Image (cartoon, rainbow, N blue to C red):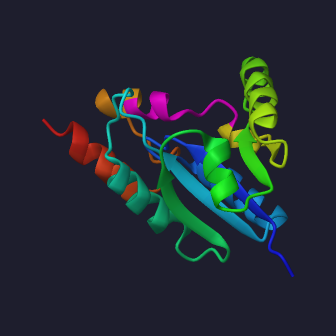
Amino acid sequence: MKKRTAVYAGSFDPPTLGHLDLIVRAAKIFDRVIVAVARNEAKQALFTVPERIEMLEEMTGDMAGVEIASFSGLTVDFARQKGAAALIRGLRVVSDFEFELSMAINNQKLNPDVDTVCLMPSEPYLFLSSRQVKEIASLGGKVGHYVTPAVEMRLRGKFAK
C-alpha cells in the first residue's frame, strides 16, 4: 500500500510551537510528513539550515512518520521528488488567505498532482510567527510559551550580549 505523503515546507527560523502544532495535526492525516526547511540564500536567517533541521528533529524525534529535510528551488518540485500528494500550509489569519490561495493556484499549475491542504492553527498559535519570536527574544523578552525549551535556549544564545 502506498503511503500518503505530505510536505510541510517553510523557513522555520526558528521552529515554533505553532509549527509543531501543524506537524502533529498533519501527521494524523498523512502517513508520512516531510518537514522541509527551505534553503533561501536571499533571506537573512538567524539560524543556519543545519541548526533549523536539528531543532525540528529535536521537536519531532518521537513522532512516527515525520521526516526532516532541506531543499532549494520550487516546493512542488521537491514534493514531486518525494512522491508527495499534498503540500501543508498554515492559515493563521485572514491576511494569510490571499497569499496562500495565490501560491496554491500557482503550485497546481506547476504540478497538478500535488494538492495544497491548509490547516488552521490551534487557538493559542493564531497570531504566532517566527519573526515575532525573534523580535521578542532579541529584546530580552520571554518566548517560552512560543517555542520549546531547547529552541528558547538557542535563541538566548544567539542574542547573548
Residue 34's place in the image compared with 43, above or below, is: below
- Residue drawn 45% across and 48% down? 144
- Residue drawn 40% across and 52% down? 52
Q: How many marks?
A: 0
Image quarter in which the C terminus is found: top left
- Residue drawn 47% across and 66% down? 57
Give how far across and how far down residue 8 sits, in percent. 65, 50
Residue furthest bottom in the image: 1
Give how far across and how far down residue 3 sits, in percent. 80, 73
- Left or right, 140 with respect to 8, comes to left
Residue furthest left in the image: 161
As for residue 19 lying within the magenta part, the answer is no
Give how far across and how far down residue 116 sits, in percent. 81, 42
Q: Which residues fall within the magenta stretch?
A: 126-134
- Residue drawn 73% across and 47% down? 88
Residue 18 visible? The answer is no
- In the image, 75 versus 144, the foreground residue is 75
- In the image, 54 versus 81, the foreground residue is 81
Give how far across and how far down residue 152 sits, in percent. 37, 50
Q: Quadrant of residue 45?
A: top left
Residue 35 visible? The answer is yes
